[in-house]
Image (spheres, grey):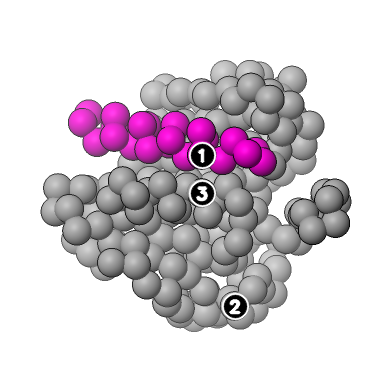
Amino acid sequence: MQSKLMIRTNEVSLEAEIFESNNETSEISVLLCHPHPQFLLDIPKKGKIRWIYA
Amino acid sequence: MHNNVISSIFDHLIKNNISCLRFNFRGVEGSTGHYSGGIGELSDVHSCIKFLQKKENRKILICGYSYGATIGCSAVNFSESIIGFCAISFPWDFMGKNFGDFSQTDKFKLFIQGDQDSIARYDNFLSHYKKYLKPKEKIIIEGADHFYRGLEGILAEDLVRFIKKIQTI
């Protein structure tokens, strides 16, 4: 089952999307961590890529 | 949550019926808050791990790409339920000083690196990789720069193979 959700912490609410396997024997869940736009700006529509690194 | 690499991996995991969670760090898209220099973002990862741990006996593999590798893999020793990590284009050269040591662990590790990557620099990759304890594996994707455009599927299949392998160990 795939669904969108908000994970609420003491400080912030995190936008998330989860897929739960229907396979009872599937033990591993993968936590995926994105790059951050604070450091990386990708502009594919303009046909070029611009980088910003602090 | 619109990055080509993470989206490809997410889709491949679903196709292979492997449970997964992706999220936006604080201040990104629909997540509240502001960028906090890495400390708050590490806390975000911890919060996601705690969320996954609500299901008993769940084993968690952290997979991070670029900045997400730096922050995500830094949480590998946060809990015993975390069995290891996959780091894609870990940017040691400019973030490793602050976070590299946190990702040291004797848990499973897979490093995926493009041989044309000039951001997470390929020419320095081996020297960083050698510092990590076993068990560890590396996959070098020929022709890939930091963005993996057109190569996302290959990368995602490599990760799925790794997961299926460690499931049997």
Instruction: Residue B153: give its label.
Output: 1
Q: Is residue B19 left or right of residue B6?
A: left
The answer to which quarter of the image holds residue B102 is top right
Quadrant holding the C terminus of chain B: top left
Give the camera-side residue of B147 and A32: B147
Magenta residues span B148-169
Return the chain for callout 1.
B
Q: Is residue B69 left or right of residue A52?
A: left
In primary-sequence order, the first of circles 1 and 2 is 2
Write down the residue under mark 2: B30
Callout 1, which amino acid?
A: Gly
Looking at the magenta stretch, what is its main secondary structure? helix
Look at the image and tell me whether residue B130 can be seen.
yes
Callout 3, which amino acid?
A: Ser
Q: Is residue B153 above or below residue A32?
A: above
CB under 8 Å between callouts 1 and 3? yes
What residue lies at 21% left-to-right and 48% top-to-bottom? A26
Are there few (<14), some (14-19), or many (20+) residues within 10 Å of tag 3?
some
Callout 2, which amino acid?
A: Gly
What residue lies at 44% left-to-right and 68% top-to-bottom? A17
Instruction: Residue B8: give its label.
Output: 3
Q: Is residue B164 above or below residue A53?
A: above
What residue lies at 34% left-to-right and 67% top-to-bottom? A2
Task: Give the x, y percent position of residue B111.
Answer: 53, 30
